[in-house]
Image (cartoon, helix red, strand yellow):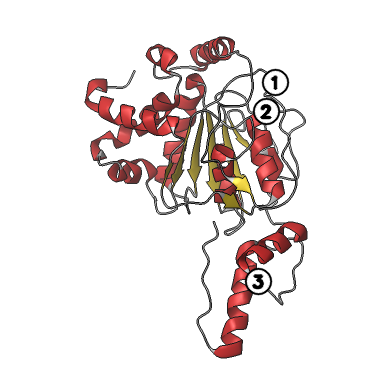
Amino acid sequence: KIDNGPRWLWLLERLDAAADDRQIFGLVPERTQVVASHASVDAFIDLYRTALVGKTYICAGVSGSGKTTAAHYLLHGDYSLRPRRGLMIRADSYPNFEQDFAQYLNAEAAAPLLYLILTRALTPKDRREQLVRPRGIGPAIDLAKATISSAMKNCGALSFETDLVHMNHGRATHIKNRPNCTDLSVLVIDGLVKSEANRNFVNKLYNAAFPAGIMVLILVKDPNWGTELIGVNGGVHILPVDGVISNPRISVDSPFTDAPQWTMMRWSAEDLRNFANLVGIQSIQIEDGMTPQQLLDLQDDNARERDGDDGIQFGVD
């Protein structure tokens, strides 16, 4: 259990309430309409539909590819299977995630226990007191099996919500139920930067997430860093998101033993044209494999050449 737990009850309660609201910590534009790569959104939703309870997943994508937008849609999108509980933490400026995020929460002394507090906050309330610090793979597997068994329920759409995020363009998303009907809580860490401290944090986090029965999704920009994180556990409990690699696993419940061939989440020409229309980009040659940020950069360059202005700046994550 969490050492000196009563001291951090207030923090657990704060994060527990945030998980009920699927809160995003860090700067994310407030919007109800988004334009995103269908491939990225589909990859994240399919991951959630098929994810194994307690696993940690890594996603690598170039800067400006829309990882943040797709993760935002995963938690708040207008589709029937979205998680009931979740947290998303923007970590681009956190070279030491547990210290930096603990400071953000005004709980600096909680940093060494942050991995436990986060996983405990996302654990179903009726199971919290069962959680212990994992001491071996055997007890962890037994507890994970018990989690799956106790979480079986009827799957279906959530109750009506008014603040859902809608795709601004394109086809409707048709979602099948999760195979075992488990309502899976999600922790998204967005933009985790490479450092020894963050590697050590992930090592502790995946060990806590497995018996807690939650899903962790870590988004990174550096493909080598993503590959390194998968190697922390040898591809057993830390896995790549199949939808963002060109060599996915044969089955979702098998370990990943290859070197991931990251697609880096580049966009299709169709999605890029929809994005260009939304933000008013004109006279730019669009090609498959570009990113929205590249279109914005080209527009900015054209504006500077045309009239010497600094151009318009858009934020694309």
Residue at 43% in and 48% down: 91
Q: Which residue is mark 2?
A: 50
In this picture, residue 163 sits left or right of residue 107: right
Q: Quadrant of the C terminus?
A: bottom right
* Residue 259 visible in rendering: no
* Badge number at residue 269: none
- Give neighbour class at mark 3: few <14, some 14-19, many 20+ (Cα, 10 Å): some
Does the residue at mark 1 contact the one at mark 2 (Cβ under 8 Å)?
yes
- Give neighbour class at mark 2: few <14, some 14-19, many 20+ (Cα, 10 Å): some
Q: Please state the horizontal and vertical placement of residue 252, each as a whole percent of the image.
A: 70, 28
In this picture, residue 311 sits left or right of residue 239: left
Q: Nearer the viewer, mark 3 or mark 2?
A: 3
- What amino acid does circle 2 point to? Thr
Q: Earlier in the sequence, mark 3 or mark 2?
A: 2
- What amino acid does circle 1 point to? Pro
Does the residue at mark 3 contact the one at mark 2 (Cβ under 8 Å)?
no
Tell me how far mark 1 sits from mark 2, CA to CA: 7 Å
Residue at 55% in and 41% down: 164
Q: Which residue is mark 1?
A: 179
Q: Please state the horizontal and vertical placement of residue 144, each as a whole percent of the image.
A: 54, 15
For the residue pair 58 and 124, the one nearer the viewer reads as 124
Q: Earlier in the sequence, mark 1 or mark 2?
A: 2
